[in-house]
Image (cartoon, helix red, strand yellow):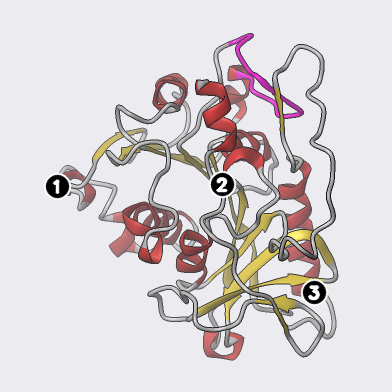
């Protein structure tokens, strides 16, 4: 039951409506959250990036000379609903990031094609609706768009500032994606590798040995003692001894704060981490680093740190 809950956590909390932008991309209508950052955000499907949902500032011109860091995201349950964590993702996008989630915008049930459930691979009990490859496909697309003539994102993406992230099963996908040398930092949410031989999910890698080959930096955001992934994530953190790493526990359980207004406190923590690790923002760094760090004194959470200079 714990494994089943880990896979299906992230079930959608209501589907948004559907609209189209002038260039044929599918986008959501108002009113929905836009994030609390400087750049009110939207999400859309783009014809040139199938099976993904792209989040970003609604007005790219408002960026001026600023460029968008890249945040690719695997959904809870490795589901194909790219809007299941939309408040979290819109919040991050509103702070000046190009956010790309695996999956699509769910269609009304009357329009949706009925597909048989995937069959678990031999030796597993569950399977995922999205592939880990979708996260690296998202990175590839963002880097191409930054250079493509006619792209609205041309010259607006910081193509070397890349975070791989995900919730629950999607966090396992992010840990694999973080092996990509282009990834700057990993953000693993309510997740962690299963112990050897205990992975119940077909098609998703869970291998503690990969922790030794991580690079850059890593943040774990767990849900406290009632989070079914807390043991896995904590064990990961304890094993990592060669890169800057932080472990934040927010006592809300495995469901996190993804669909709370502006993504709740978890989105606040993740945005600060991205601002530090991708933008070198000193104010954001002070929330994590130093003996009197901002999050060290925050009663809403606990934090552990290692290899911070």
Q: What's the mark number on residue 91?
A: none
Residue 246 x, y percent position in the rendering: 37, 37
Q: What's the mark number on residue 297?
A: 1
| Residue at x 60% of width, y 85% of height | 60
Left or right, 281 with respect to 189, comes to left
Instruction: Rate crowding at label 3 as few (under 14), some (14 to 19) or many (20 or more) other CA atoms within 10 Å.
Output: some
Q: What's the mark number on residue 11?
A: 2
Circle nearer the N terminus (2, 1): 2
- What's the CA distance linking mark 3 and mark 2? 35 Å
**Span highlighted in magenta in the image:** 196-207
| Residue at x 60% of width, y 82% of height | 29
> Was residue 108 drawn as part of the magenta stretch in this picture?
no
Task: In the rendered view, tell whether residue 14 sits above or below residue 228.
Answer: below
Quarter of the image that includes the C terminus: top left
Callout 2: SS? loop
Residue 151 x, y percent position in the rendering: 79, 81
Callout 3: SS? helix
Circle nearer the N terminus (3, 2): 2
- What's the CA distance linking mark 3 and mark 1? 43 Å
The residue identified by callout 3 is: 147
Task: In the rendered view, tell whether residue 200 sits above or below residue 262.
Answer: above
């Amino acid at each position: 039951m714990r494994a089943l809950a880990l896979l299906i956590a992230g079930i959608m909390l209501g589907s948004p409506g559907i609209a189209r932008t002038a260039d044929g991309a599918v986008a959501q209508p108002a009113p929905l959250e836009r994030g609390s950052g400087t750049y009110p955000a939207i999400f859309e499907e783009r014809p040139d990036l199938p099976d993904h949902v792209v989040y970003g500032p609604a007005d790219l011109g408002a960026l001026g000379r600023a460029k968008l860091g890249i945040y690719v995201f695997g959904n809870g349950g490795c589901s194909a609903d790219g809007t299941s964590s939309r408040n979290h993702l819109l919040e991050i996008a509103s702070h000046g990031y190009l956010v790309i989630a695996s999956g699509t915008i769910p269609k009304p049930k009357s329009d949706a094609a009925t597909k048989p459930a995937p069959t678990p691979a031999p030796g597993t009990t569950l399977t995922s609706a999205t592939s880990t490859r979708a996260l690296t496909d998202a990175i590839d697309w963002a880097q191409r768009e930054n250079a493509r003539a006619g792209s609205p994102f041309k010259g607006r993406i910081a193509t070397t500032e890349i975070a791989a992230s995900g919730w629950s099963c999607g966090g396992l996908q992010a840990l694999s994606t973080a092996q990509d040398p282009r990834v700057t930092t990993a953000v693993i949410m309510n997740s962690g590798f299963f112990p050897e031989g205990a992975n119940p999910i077909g098609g998703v890698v869970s291998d503690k040995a990969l922790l030794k080959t991580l690079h850059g930096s890593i943040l774990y955001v767990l849900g406290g003692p009632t989070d079914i992934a807390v043991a896995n994530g904590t064990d990961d953190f304890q094993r990592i001894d060669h890169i800057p790493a932080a472990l934040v526990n927010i006592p809300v359980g495995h469901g996190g704060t993804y669909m709370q207004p502006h993504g709740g406190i978890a989105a606040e923590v993740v945005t600060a981490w991205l601002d530090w690790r991708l933008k070198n923002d000193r104010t954001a760094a002070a929330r994590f680093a130093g003996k009197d760090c901002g999050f060290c004194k925050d009663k809403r959470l606990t934090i552990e740190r290692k290899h911070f200079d």
